Amino acid sequence: MINVPKTKLLFFDLETVGIEQDYKTLKKNKPELAKLFESYQNWIVKRFPEEEGNSVEEMFYNKAALIPEFAKIIVASFAFYAPDGNIHKQTFSSDQEIEVLQEIKNLLTKVGKLDFYLCGHNIKNFDIPMMGKRMIINGMKPPSILPQYDTKPWEMRAVDTMEIWKFGNNFSMASLELMCVSMGVTSPKDGEVTGNIVHQTYWETEALDPIATYCEEDVDVLAKLMDKLYNLV
């Protein structure tokens, strides 16, 4: 079903927050960026229909973490299966995004030379573009394992569990939580921190540890899901 050996998959997940705590702070610290965010309100509503009728302040608070130009990466968690079947994990977290990005780049450069593929849920639409854009914005050249502007879809070194679950049907329900429950894998959505409140948790508590734990749980789940897929008979 999957042509890449399990031991050549690098499971990963990112946790992102808005680049500032709120729109008011963005407007004060980065006025040009704030002006651009306001100009993209129609795009935001089309992309996230639930934001219809919300103010620009509410849109920033709710969705900035999902838009690379207005977000920052605070946690990145990775794991892979060793040939002996054991899982090796590594998590990077920092208030200074450049530190997280440098650790990510170092790891991706290393595994890229070992013919690894990135593996995660919706990584082609979110995590991979997020990493690439945030690296460029921070003055870093993305590692070669990330797709370039001329990389063909079938040349991407990525296995996306969302695509696996959709079976070619773009209208199919394919959340990570639904995939977990359907396959009998404990969902990562039961802890104190969940994806929809990461921005709030980070900016109100300044606590990275619970966010890192949540990120690691997502990666654990990815590894378990893929293990089940590799063991299908």
Image (tube, rainbow, N blue to C red):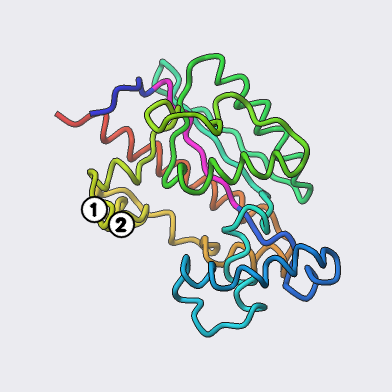
Answer whether labels 1 and 2 touch (C-beta < 8 Å).
Answer: yes
Q: Which residue corresponds to the image point at 37% horizontal and 29% vertical from the top-left?
A: 154
Would residue 181 be found to the left or right of residue 17 on screen? Answer: left
Disc 2 crowd rating (10 Å Cα; few below 14, some 14-19, many 20+) is: some
Image quarter of residue 33: bottom right
Residue at 77% in and 51% down? 95
Whole-angstrom CA distance, mark 1 to mark 2, is 6 Å
Q: Which residue is mark 2?
A: 178
How many numbered badges does the structure rendering display?
Answer: 2
* Residue 8 on the magenta segment: yes
Per the image, the residue denoted by label 1 is 182
Q: Is residue 86 above or below residue 176?
A: above
**x and y percent of residue 103 in the render?**
70, 32
Q: Which range is magenta?
A: 7-15
Check the picture and name the quadrant holding the C terminus.
top left
Q: SS of the residue at dot 2?
A: helix
- Residue 45 shown in magenta: no
Q: Amino acid at mark 2?
A: Leu
